[in-house]
Amino acid sequence: MNNPPAPIPQVNKWLVTVTVMLPTIIEILDMSVANVALGHMQGSLSAGLDEITWVLTSYLVANAIIIPITGWLSATFGRKNYLVFSLGLFTFSSLMCGAAPNLETLILFRVLQGLGGGALQPLALSILLETFPPRQHGMAMAVYGIGIVFGPILGPLLGGYITDNLSWRWIFYINLPLGGLAILMALLFIFDPAYIRRAQAGIDYWGLGLLCVGLGALQVVLDRGEREDWFASNFIVGLSVMAVVCLTLFVRLEWRHPSPVVRLQVFKNRSFTTGNLIMFFCFFAFFGSIVLLPLYLQNLMGYTAYLAGLVLGPGGISTLIMMPLVGRLIGVVDARLMLAAGMLINALALYLMSAFTLTTDFWSVIWPRILQGVGISLFFVPLSTLTLSSLSKPEMGNGSAIFNLLRNLGGSFGVAFITTVLSRRAQFHQGHLSEGFSPYDFKLQQAQPTMQQYLQGAGLEATTARQGSLELLYRQLQQQAAMLSFNDVFWLLSLFFLGLVPFIVLIRRRRDAIAQTGT
Protein backbone atom coordinates (compact mmCIF):
# COMPACT_ATOMS: atom_id res chain seq x y z
CA MET A 1 0.00 0.00 0.00
CA ASN A 2 1.42 3.35 -1.07
CA ASN A 3 1.78 6.03 1.56
CA PRO A 4 0.07 9.36 0.74
CA PRO A 5 2.48 12.12 -0.29
CA ALA A 6 3.71 14.36 2.50
CA PRO A 7 1.91 17.71 2.66
CA ILE A 8 3.77 20.65 1.17
CA PRO A 9 4.93 23.07 3.90
CA GLN A 10 3.33 26.51 3.78
CA VAL A 11 5.96 29.21 3.42
CA ASN A 12 5.39 32.97 3.53
CA LYS A 13 5.04 34.16 -0.07
CA TRP A 14 7.46 37.06 0.45
CA LEU A 15 10.18 34.71 1.68
CA VAL A 16 9.68 32.67 -1.50
CA THR A 17 9.75 35.89 -3.54
CA VAL A 18 13.08 37.01 -2.08
CA THR A 19 14.47 33.49 -2.53
CA VAL A 20 13.78 33.34 -6.28
CA MET A 21 14.30 37.01 -7.14
CA LEU A 22 17.74 37.34 -5.51
CA PRO A 23 19.47 34.94 -7.94
CA THR A 24 17.36 36.18 -10.84
CA ILE A 25 18.56 39.76 -10.39
CA ILE A 26 22.17 38.55 -10.05
CA GLU A 27 21.85 36.57 -13.29
CA ILE A 28 20.33 39.49 -15.19
CA LEU A 29 23.06 41.80 -13.92
CA ASP A 30 25.67 39.33 -15.17
CA MET A 31 24.28 39.65 -18.70
CA SER A 32 25.28 43.33 -18.82
CA VAL A 33 27.80 43.93 -16.04
CA ALA A 34 30.68 42.43 -18.05
CA ASN A 35 30.14 44.79 -21.01
CA VAL A 36 31.92 47.74 -19.44
CA ALA A 37 34.84 45.57 -18.21
CA LEU A 38 35.80 44.11 -21.60
CA GLY A 39 38.64 46.60 -22.12
CA HIS A 40 40.17 45.70 -18.75
CA MET A 41 39.80 41.97 -19.46
CA GLN A 42 41.39 42.42 -22.87
CA GLY A 43 44.51 44.01 -21.41
CA SER A 44 44.73 41.63 -18.47
CA LEU A 45 44.38 38.47 -20.58
CA SER A 46 46.31 39.73 -23.65
CA ALA A 47 43.33 39.12 -25.95
CA GLY A 48 42.30 40.73 -29.22
CA LEU A 49 39.06 42.69 -29.60
CA ASP A 50 37.28 39.92 -31.52
CA GLU A 51 38.50 37.32 -29.03
CA ILE A 52 37.38 39.18 -25.89
CA THR A 53 33.80 39.64 -27.18
CA TRP A 54 33.36 35.86 -26.86
CA VAL A 55 33.15 36.51 -23.10
CA LEU A 56 29.72 38.03 -23.83
CA THR A 57 28.71 35.77 -26.73
CA SER A 58 29.44 32.51 -24.90
CA TYR A 59 27.23 33.52 -21.97
CA LEU A 60 24.34 34.58 -24.21
CA VAL A 61 24.53 31.38 -26.29
CA ALA A 62 24.43 29.18 -23.17
CA ASN A 63 21.50 31.21 -21.81
CA ALA A 64 19.55 30.88 -25.04
CA ILE A 65 20.02 27.09 -25.09
CA ILE A 66 18.99 26.38 -21.51
CA ILE A 67 15.98 28.71 -21.09
CA PRO A 68 13.46 26.87 -23.32
CA ILE A 69 14.17 23.44 -21.79
CA THR A 70 13.91 24.63 -18.18
CA GLY A 71 10.35 23.33 -17.84
CA TRP A 72 11.35 19.89 -19.09
CA LEU A 73 14.42 19.72 -16.83
CA SER A 74 12.31 20.77 -13.82
CA ALA A 75 9.80 18.00 -14.50
CA THR A 76 12.59 15.45 -15.05
CA PHE A 77 14.75 16.16 -11.99
CA GLY A 78 12.35 18.04 -9.70
CA ARG A 79 12.10 21.80 -9.66
CA LYS A 80 13.76 22.35 -6.27
CA ASN A 81 16.65 20.04 -7.16
CA TYR A 82 17.14 21.76 -10.49
CA LEU A 83 16.98 25.24 -8.93
CA VAL A 84 19.61 24.36 -6.31
CA PHE A 85 21.81 22.71 -8.96
CA SER A 86 21.54 25.78 -11.24
CA LEU A 87 22.41 28.12 -8.37
CA GLY A 88 25.38 25.96 -7.43
CA LEU A 89 26.66 25.80 -11.02
CA PHE A 90 26.21 29.57 -11.46
CA THR A 91 28.02 30.39 -8.19
CA PHE A 92 30.89 27.94 -8.80
CA SER A 93 31.32 29.22 -12.38
CA SER A 94 31.41 32.82 -11.09
CA LEU A 95 34.29 31.88 -8.79
CA MET A 96 36.17 30.24 -11.65
CA CYS A 97 35.52 33.17 -14.02
CA GLY A 98 37.04 35.54 -11.49
CA ALA A 99 40.09 33.29 -11.06
CA ALA A 100 40.54 32.55 -14.79
CA PRO A 101 44.24 32.73 -15.75
CA ASN A 102 43.58 33.03 -19.49
CA LEU A 103 40.87 33.79 -22.03
CA GLU A 104 40.09 30.15 -22.88
CA THR A 105 39.39 29.30 -19.25
CA LEU A 106 37.24 32.41 -18.83
CA ILE A 107 35.11 31.55 -21.87
CA LEU A 108 34.68 27.94 -20.71
CA PHE A 109 33.35 28.99 -17.33
CA ARG A 110 31.21 31.74 -18.87
CA VAL A 111 29.47 28.96 -20.83
CA LEU A 112 28.88 27.03 -17.60
CA GLN A 113 27.75 30.21 -15.88
CA GLY A 114 25.23 30.81 -18.67
CA LEU A 115 23.94 27.24 -18.41
CA GLY A 116 23.44 27.66 -14.67
CA GLY A 117 22.02 31.16 -14.83
CA GLY A 118 19.70 30.68 -17.80
CA ALA A 119 17.29 28.53 -15.79
CA LEU A 120 16.88 31.08 -13.00
CA GLN A 121 14.54 33.47 -14.83
CA PRO A 122 11.87 30.97 -15.97
CA LEU A 123 12.06 29.09 -12.66
CA ALA A 124 11.52 32.31 -10.71
CA LEU A 125 8.59 33.27 -12.91
CA SER A 126 6.77 29.95 -12.59
CA ILE A 127 7.37 29.79 -8.82
CA LEU A 128 6.05 33.32 -8.32
CA LEU A 129 2.90 32.61 -10.32
CA GLU A 130 2.21 29.54 -8.19
CA THR A 131 3.06 31.20 -4.88
CA PHE A 132 0.71 34.16 -5.41
CA PRO A 133 -3.00 33.43 -5.88
CA PRO A 134 -4.49 34.34 -9.30
CA ARG A 135 -5.95 37.61 -8.01
CA GLN A 136 -2.41 38.70 -7.02
CA HIS A 137 -0.63 37.65 -10.21
CA GLY A 138 -0.29 41.32 -11.13
CA MET A 139 1.79 41.92 -8.00
CA ALA A 140 3.89 38.83 -8.74
CA MET A 141 4.62 40.15 -12.23
CA ALA A 142 5.46 43.56 -10.79
CA VAL A 143 8.08 42.05 -8.49
CA TYR A 144 9.48 39.98 -11.34
CA GLY A 145 9.43 42.95 -13.70
CA ILE A 146 11.50 45.09 -11.33
CA GLY A 147 14.36 42.64 -11.65
CA ILE A 148 13.96 42.12 -15.39
CA VAL A 149 13.86 45.82 -16.29
CA PHE A 150 16.06 47.31 -13.58
CA GLY A 151 18.90 44.78 -13.97
CA PRO A 152 20.12 45.92 -17.43
CA ILE A 153 20.10 49.54 -16.22
CA LEU A 154 21.99 48.89 -12.99
CA GLY A 155 24.46 46.43 -14.58
CA PRO A 156 26.66 48.89 -16.52
CA LEU A 157 26.79 51.31 -13.56
CA LEU A 158 27.77 48.57 -11.10
CA GLY A 159 30.23 47.01 -13.54
CA GLY A 160 31.91 50.34 -14.23
CA TYR A 161 32.23 51.19 -10.53
CA ILE A 162 33.66 47.80 -9.57
CA THR A 163 36.07 47.71 -12.50
CA ASP A 164 37.38 51.22 -11.84
CA ASN A 165 37.76 50.82 -8.07
CA LEU A 166 38.61 47.13 -7.63
CA SER A 167 39.25 44.81 -10.58
CA TRP A 168 37.23 43.20 -13.36
CA ARG A 169 37.52 39.90 -11.45
CA TRP A 170 35.27 41.30 -8.71
CA ILE A 171 32.27 41.54 -11.06
CA PHE A 172 32.27 37.73 -10.74
CA TYR A 173 33.38 37.42 -7.12
CA ILE A 174 30.42 39.48 -5.84
CA ASN A 175 28.17 36.60 -6.94
CA LEU A 176 29.68 34.25 -4.36
CA PRO A 177 28.07 35.44 -1.09
CA LEU A 178 24.78 36.23 -2.83
CA GLY A 179 24.77 32.86 -4.60
CA GLY A 180 25.53 31.03 -1.34
CA LEU A 181 22.67 32.84 0.41
CA ALA A 182 20.31 32.02 -2.47
CA ILE A 183 21.21 28.29 -2.28
CA LEU A 184 20.53 28.22 1.47
CA MET A 185 17.17 29.99 1.06
CA ALA A 186 16.16 27.67 -1.79
CA LEU A 187 16.87 24.62 0.39
CA LEU A 188 14.77 26.07 3.22
CA PHE A 189 11.84 27.73 1.46
CA ILE A 190 11.26 26.15 -1.97
CA PHE A 191 9.18 22.96 -2.35
CA ASP A 192 7.90 21.13 -5.39
CA PRO A 193 4.13 21.34 -5.93
CA ALA A 194 2.14 18.09 -5.98
CA TYR A 195 1.55 18.14 -9.75
CA ILE A 196 5.26 17.98 -10.60
CA ARG A 197 6.11 14.36 -11.28
CA ARG A 198 9.51 13.27 -12.44
CA ALA A 199 9.30 12.22 -16.04
CA GLN A 200 9.65 8.50 -16.78
CA ALA A 201 9.62 8.79 -20.58
CA GLY A 202 12.79 8.56 -22.63
CA ILE A 203 14.80 11.67 -23.44
CA ASP A 204 14.05 13.35 -26.76
CA TYR A 205 17.68 13.46 -27.89
CA TRP A 206 16.90 14.68 -31.41
CA GLY A 207 14.78 17.57 -30.17
CA LEU A 208 17.34 18.52 -27.55
CA GLY A 209 20.19 18.44 -30.07
CA LEU A 210 18.33 20.43 -32.73
CA LEU A 211 17.32 23.06 -30.17
CA CYS A 212 20.85 23.48 -28.78
CA VAL A 213 22.47 23.77 -32.21
CA GLY A 214 19.71 25.99 -33.68
CA LEU A 215 19.50 28.48 -30.81
CA GLY A 216 23.28 28.51 -30.30
CA ALA A 217 23.86 29.34 -33.98
CA LEU A 218 21.11 31.98 -33.94
CA GLN A 219 22.53 33.74 -30.86
CA VAL A 220 26.02 33.86 -32.38
CA VAL A 221 24.58 35.35 -35.58
CA LEU A 222 22.74 38.06 -33.62
CA ASP A 223 25.69 38.88 -31.39
CA ARG A 224 28.44 38.94 -34.03
CA GLY A 225 26.57 39.71 -37.25
CA GLU A 226 27.31 43.44 -37.28
CA ARG A 227 31.04 42.90 -36.65
CA GLU A 228 31.21 40.34 -39.48
CA ASP A 229 29.18 42.54 -41.91
CA TRP A 230 26.25 40.12 -41.79
CA PHE A 231 25.72 38.08 -44.97
CA ALA A 232 28.92 39.31 -46.58
CA SER A 233 30.57 36.82 -44.19
CA ASN A 234 30.57 33.10 -44.99
CA PHE A 235 30.72 32.46 -41.25
CA ILE A 236 27.42 34.28 -40.65
CA VAL A 237 25.76 32.76 -43.72
CA GLY A 238 26.69 29.25 -42.61
CA LEU A 239 25.43 29.79 -39.06
CA SER A 240 22.21 31.37 -40.35
CA VAL A 241 21.46 28.37 -42.57
CA MET A 242 22.25 26.05 -39.67
CA ALA A 243 19.89 27.98 -37.35
CA VAL A 244 17.00 28.01 -39.83
CA VAL A 245 17.31 24.30 -40.71
CA CYS A 246 17.72 23.11 -37.11
CA LEU A 247 14.91 25.23 -35.67
CA THR A 248 12.52 24.29 -38.51
CA LEU A 249 13.21 20.58 -37.94
CA PHE A 250 12.87 21.13 -34.19
CA VAL A 251 9.38 22.64 -34.54
CA ARG A 252 8.22 19.82 -36.85
CA LEU A 253 9.59 17.16 -34.51
CA GLU A 254 8.39 18.64 -31.21
CA TRP A 255 4.85 19.26 -32.45
CA ARG A 256 4.33 15.50 -32.90
CA HIS A 257 6.64 14.07 -30.23
CA PRO A 258 4.85 12.37 -27.27
CA SER A 259 7.43 13.65 -24.73
CA PRO A 260 8.90 16.87 -26.19
CA VAL A 261 11.58 18.92 -24.45
CA VAL A 262 9.48 22.01 -25.26
CA ARG A 263 5.72 21.59 -25.46
CA LEU A 264 4.76 23.76 -28.45
CA GLN A 265 1.04 22.91 -28.22
CA VAL A 266 0.83 25.72 -25.69
CA PHE A 267 0.73 28.09 -28.69
CA LYS A 268 -2.80 26.87 -29.41
CA ASN A 269 -3.75 29.25 -26.59
CA ARG A 270 -4.57 32.52 -28.38
CA SER A 271 -3.77 34.82 -25.47
CA PHE A 272 -0.42 33.12 -24.85
CA THR A 273 0.58 33.31 -28.52
CA THR A 274 -0.47 36.95 -28.93
CA GLY A 275 1.20 37.95 -25.65
CA ASN A 276 4.49 36.36 -26.71
CA LEU A 277 4.32 38.08 -30.09
CA ILE A 278 3.79 41.48 -28.45
CA MET A 279 6.49 40.81 -25.84
CA PHE A 280 9.03 39.86 -28.52
CA PHE A 281 8.59 43.02 -30.59
CA CYS A 282 8.15 45.41 -27.66
CA PHE A 283 11.35 44.18 -25.99
CA PHE A 284 12.91 44.39 -29.45
CA ALA A 285 12.22 48.14 -29.31
CA PHE A 286 12.82 48.61 -25.57
CA PHE A 287 16.24 46.91 -25.38
CA GLY A 288 17.20 48.60 -28.63
CA SER A 289 16.57 51.99 -27.03
CA ILE A 290 18.43 51.02 -23.82
CA VAL A 291 21.52 50.34 -25.96
CA LEU A 292 20.97 53.32 -28.26
CA LEU A 293 20.72 56.04 -25.61
CA PRO A 294 24.17 55.47 -23.99
CA LEU A 295 25.72 55.31 -27.47
CA TYR A 296 24.23 58.71 -28.30
CA LEU A 297 25.38 60.23 -25.00
CA GLN A 298 28.95 58.87 -25.12
CA ASN A 299 29.73 59.05 -28.85
CA LEU A 300 28.06 62.36 -29.70
CA MET A 301 27.57 64.26 -26.45
CA GLY A 302 30.88 63.38 -24.80
CA TYR A 303 29.40 61.81 -21.65
CA THR A 304 31.50 59.38 -19.65
CA ALA A 305 30.18 55.83 -19.20
CA TYR A 306 29.23 56.68 -15.62
CA LEU A 307 27.29 59.83 -16.60
CA ALA A 308 25.53 57.92 -19.37
CA GLY A 309 24.50 55.36 -16.76
CA LEU A 310 23.17 58.14 -14.53
CA VAL A 311 20.89 59.26 -17.35
CA LEU A 312 19.37 55.78 -17.44
CA GLY A 313 18.96 55.76 -13.66
CA PRO A 314 15.87 58.01 -13.28
CA GLY A 315 14.00 55.82 -15.75
CA GLY A 316 14.86 52.80 -13.61
CA ILE A 317 13.62 54.62 -10.50
CA SER A 318 10.31 55.50 -12.13
CA THR A 319 9.97 51.81 -13.09
CA LEU A 320 10.76 50.78 -9.52
CA ILE A 321 8.01 53.07 -8.20
CA MET A 322 5.40 52.24 -10.83
CA MET A 323 5.70 48.43 -10.96
CA PRO A 324 4.03 47.75 -7.55
CA LEU A 325 1.33 50.35 -8.25
CA VAL A 326 0.50 48.74 -11.58
CA GLY A 327 0.52 45.31 -9.90
CA ARG A 328 -2.16 46.48 -7.48
CA LEU A 329 -4.25 48.05 -10.25
CA ILE A 330 -4.37 44.80 -12.25
CA GLY A 331 -7.32 43.52 -10.23
CA VAL A 332 -9.23 46.82 -10.56
CA VAL A 333 -8.59 48.10 -14.11
CA ASP A 334 -8.82 46.06 -17.32
CA ALA A 335 -5.21 44.95 -17.86
CA ARG A 336 -5.60 45.38 -21.61
CA LEU A 337 -6.27 49.11 -21.18
CA MET A 338 -3.13 49.51 -19.06
CA LEU A 339 -1.18 47.55 -21.66
CA ALA A 340 -2.37 49.88 -24.42
CA ALA A 341 -1.49 52.92 -22.29
CA GLY A 342 1.98 51.53 -21.62
CA MET A 343 2.68 50.91 -25.29
CA LEU A 344 1.49 54.40 -26.27
CA ILE A 345 3.62 56.03 -23.54
CA ASN A 346 6.66 54.07 -24.73
CA ALA A 347 5.98 55.20 -28.29
CA LEU A 348 5.76 58.82 -27.08
CA ALA A 349 9.02 58.56 -25.10
CA LEU A 350 10.88 57.18 -28.12
CA TYR A 351 9.34 59.85 -30.35
CA LEU A 352 10.68 62.53 -27.96
CA MET A 353 14.11 60.89 -28.15
CA SER A 354 13.95 61.12 -31.94
CA ALA A 355 14.05 64.91 -31.52
CA PHE A 356 17.41 64.92 -29.69
CA THR A 357 20.12 67.17 -31.14
CA LEU A 358 23.81 67.81 -30.55
CA THR A 359 22.86 70.59 -28.11
CA THR A 360 20.27 68.70 -26.03
CA ASP A 361 20.86 69.32 -22.33
CA PHE A 362 21.03 66.77 -19.50
CA TRP A 363 17.48 67.24 -18.22
CA SER A 364 15.95 67.12 -21.68
CA VAL A 365 17.44 63.63 -22.04
CA ILE A 366 16.29 62.47 -18.60
CA TRP A 367 12.58 63.32 -18.96
CA PRO A 368 11.87 60.93 -21.88
CA ARG A 369 13.69 58.22 -19.90
CA ILE A 370 11.42 58.81 -16.88
CA LEU A 371 8.42 58.65 -19.19
CA GLN A 372 9.75 55.42 -20.69
CA GLY A 373 10.14 53.96 -17.18
CA VAL A 374 6.46 54.63 -16.49
CA GLY A 375 5.49 53.19 -19.87
CA ILE A 376 7.48 49.97 -19.46
CA SER A 377 5.79 49.36 -16.07
CA LEU A 378 2.34 49.76 -17.63
CA PHE A 379 3.42 47.47 -20.45
CA PHE A 380 5.38 44.65 -18.77
CA VAL A 381 3.17 43.86 -15.77
CA PRO A 382 -0.20 43.66 -17.61
CA LEU A 383 1.25 41.79 -20.58
CA SER A 384 3.03 39.18 -18.43
CA THR A 385 -0.09 38.70 -16.32
CA LEU A 386 -2.44 38.38 -19.30
CA THR A 387 -0.13 36.01 -21.15
CA LEU A 388 0.72 33.60 -18.34
CA SER A 389 -2.56 33.70 -16.39
CA SER A 390 -4.15 32.01 -19.39
CA LEU A 391 -2.14 28.82 -18.62
CA SER A 392 -2.93 26.08 -16.11
CA LYS A 393 -0.41 25.41 -13.33
CA PRO A 394 1.06 22.27 -14.96
CA GLU A 395 1.73 24.34 -18.11
CA MET A 396 3.31 27.22 -16.19
CA GLY A 397 6.90 25.95 -16.21
CA ASN A 398 6.91 25.26 -19.95
CA GLY A 399 5.06 28.51 -20.70
CA SER A 400 7.34 30.70 -18.57
CA ALA A 401 10.41 29.17 -20.26
CA ILE A 402 9.05 30.02 -23.73
CA PHE A 403 8.02 33.49 -22.53
CA ASN A 404 11.50 34.24 -21.19
CA LEU A 405 13.18 32.86 -24.31
CA LEU A 406 11.15 35.05 -26.67
CA ARG A 407 11.68 38.11 -24.46
CA ASN A 408 15.45 37.58 -24.50
CA LEU A 409 15.49 36.85 -28.23
CA GLY A 410 13.47 40.02 -28.82
CA GLY A 411 16.16 41.99 -27.01
CA SER A 412 18.94 40.28 -28.99
CA PHE A 413 17.20 40.92 -32.31
CA GLY A 414 16.56 44.53 -31.26
CA VAL A 415 20.21 45.24 -30.43
CA ALA A 416 21.38 43.62 -33.69
CA PHE A 417 18.78 45.64 -35.62
CA ILE A 418 19.57 49.05 -34.15
CA THR A 419 23.34 48.72 -34.49
CA THR A 420 22.95 47.75 -38.16
CA VAL A 421 20.39 50.42 -39.05
CA LEU A 422 22.36 53.05 -37.14
CA SER A 423 25.47 52.32 -39.20
CA ARG A 424 23.56 52.22 -42.50
CA ARG A 425 21.65 55.46 -41.86
CA ALA A 426 24.84 57.27 -40.77
CA GLN A 427 26.41 56.33 -44.12
CA PHE A 428 23.28 57.52 -45.95
CA HIS A 429 23.15 60.90 -44.18
CA GLN A 430 26.88 61.44 -44.51
CA GLY A 431 26.67 60.84 -48.25
CA HIS A 432 23.71 63.21 -48.54
CA LEU A 433 25.26 66.00 -46.45
CA SER A 434 28.65 65.78 -48.14
CA GLU A 435 27.27 66.17 -51.68
CA GLY A 436 28.11 69.87 -51.68
CA PHE A 437 31.10 69.65 -49.37
CA SER A 438 34.04 71.04 -51.39
CA PRO A 439 36.48 73.95 -51.03
CA TYR A 440 34.55 75.76 -53.78
CA ASP A 441 31.15 75.59 -52.07
CA PHE A 442 29.90 79.14 -51.28
CA LYS A 443 28.57 78.34 -47.78
CA LEU A 444 31.73 76.44 -46.93
CA GLN A 445 33.83 79.38 -48.07
CA GLN A 446 31.79 81.58 -45.70
CA ALA A 447 32.27 79.25 -42.72
CA GLN A 448 35.90 78.37 -43.28
CA PRO A 449 37.48 81.80 -42.42
CA THR A 450 35.84 81.75 -39.01
CA MET A 451 37.28 78.30 -38.29
CA GLN A 452 40.66 79.37 -39.70
CA GLN A 453 40.82 82.49 -37.52
CA TYR A 454 39.96 80.38 -34.47
CA LEU A 455 42.79 77.93 -35.19
CA GLN A 456 45.26 80.69 -35.94
CA GLY A 457 44.30 82.27 -32.62
CA ALA A 458 45.23 78.95 -31.03
CA GLY A 459 48.76 79.34 -32.41
CA LEU A 460 48.64 77.41 -35.68
CA GLU A 461 50.27 78.70 -38.87
CA ALA A 462 47.98 79.94 -41.64
CA THR A 463 48.48 76.90 -43.92
CA THR A 464 47.97 74.43 -41.09
CA ALA A 465 44.96 76.41 -39.84
CA ARG A 466 43.34 76.33 -43.28
CA GLN A 467 43.72 72.55 -43.51
CA GLY A 468 42.56 72.16 -39.91
CA SER A 469 39.44 74.24 -40.59
CA LEU A 470 38.39 71.83 -43.35
CA GLU A 471 38.95 68.88 -41.02
CA LEU A 472 36.85 70.51 -38.28
CA LEU A 473 34.03 71.21 -40.70
CA TYR A 474 34.09 67.64 -41.98
CA ARG A 475 34.06 66.32 -38.42
CA GLN A 476 30.96 68.41 -37.75
CA LEU A 477 29.38 66.95 -40.86
CA GLN A 478 30.06 63.43 -39.55
CA GLN A 479 28.52 64.32 -36.18
CA GLN A 480 25.41 65.72 -37.84
CA ALA A 481 25.07 62.58 -39.98
CA ALA A 482 25.41 60.40 -36.89
CA MET A 483 22.83 62.49 -35.01
CA LEU A 484 20.34 62.15 -37.87
CA SER A 485 20.85 58.38 -37.85
CA PHE A 486 20.05 58.26 -34.12
CA ASN A 487 16.90 60.32 -34.79
CA ASP A 488 15.85 57.84 -37.48
CA VAL A 489 16.30 54.76 -35.29
CA PHE A 490 14.50 56.26 -32.26
CA TRP A 491 11.58 57.19 -34.53
CA LEU A 492 11.52 53.70 -36.07
CA LEU A 493 11.46 52.05 -32.63
CA SER A 494 8.48 54.22 -31.61
CA LEU A 495 6.60 52.82 -34.61
CA PHE A 496 7.10 49.28 -33.31
CA PHE A 497 5.15 50.11 -30.15
CA LEU A 498 2.40 51.88 -32.10
CA GLY A 499 2.06 49.08 -34.64
CA LEU A 500 1.48 46.44 -31.97
CA VAL A 501 -1.37 48.21 -30.14
CA PRO A 502 -4.16 46.72 -32.36
CA PHE A 503 -3.04 43.18 -31.48
CA ILE A 504 -4.18 43.71 -27.87
CA VAL A 505 -7.78 42.91 -28.86
CA LEU A 506 -6.72 39.28 -29.50
CA ILE A 507 -5.85 38.78 -25.81
CA ARG A 508 -8.64 37.62 -23.51
CA ARG A 509 -9.54 39.66 -20.47
CA ARG A 510 -7.72 38.44 -17.38
CA ARG A 511 -10.74 37.07 -15.53
CA ASP A 512 -11.83 35.22 -18.68
CA ALA A 513 -8.38 33.62 -18.93
CA ILE A 514 -8.44 32.59 -15.26
CA ALA A 515 -11.91 31.11 -15.65
CA GLN A 516 -10.74 29.17 -18.71
CA THR A 517 -7.82 27.54 -16.85
CA GLY A 518 -9.77 26.98 -13.67
CA THR A 519 -6.99 28.46 -11.56
Image (tube, helix red, strand yellow):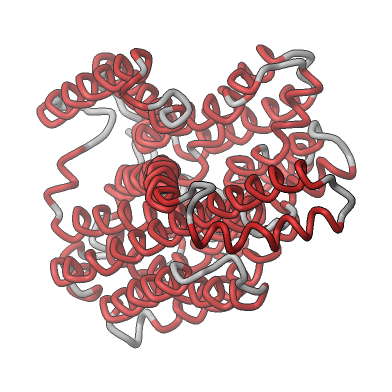
Vertical relation: 384 (above or below) 364: above
Residue 398 at x, y = what percent?
31, 42
Vertical relation: 147 (above or below) 262: below
- Asked if residue 345 lies left or right of residue 107, the reply is left
Q: Residue at x 65, y 77 (%)?
A: 363
Give the quarter of the figure containing the C terminus: bottom left
Q: Residue at x 44, y 48 (%)?
A: 434
Exactly how many numbered labels are in the figure? 0
Q: Residue at x 37, y 50 (%)?
A: 432
- Asked if residue 299 lies left or right of residue 275, the reply is right
- Between 388 and 281, the one lying in front of the other is 281
Q: Can residue 404 be seen in this view?
A: no
- Between 312 and 49, the one lying in front of the other is 49
Q: Which residue is drawn at 36% across and 27% down?
A: 230
Residue 498 at x, y = what percent?
27, 69
Q: In which quarter of the image is residue 229?
A: top left
- Asked if residue 403 lies left or right of residue 50, the reply is left
Vertical relation: 121 (above or below) 297: above
Residue 314 at x, y = what percent?
64, 72
Residue 323 at x, y = what percent?
51, 73
Q: Is residue 293 visible?
A: yes
Give the quarter of the figure containing the N terminus: top left
- Between 487 and 441, the one lying in front of the other is 441
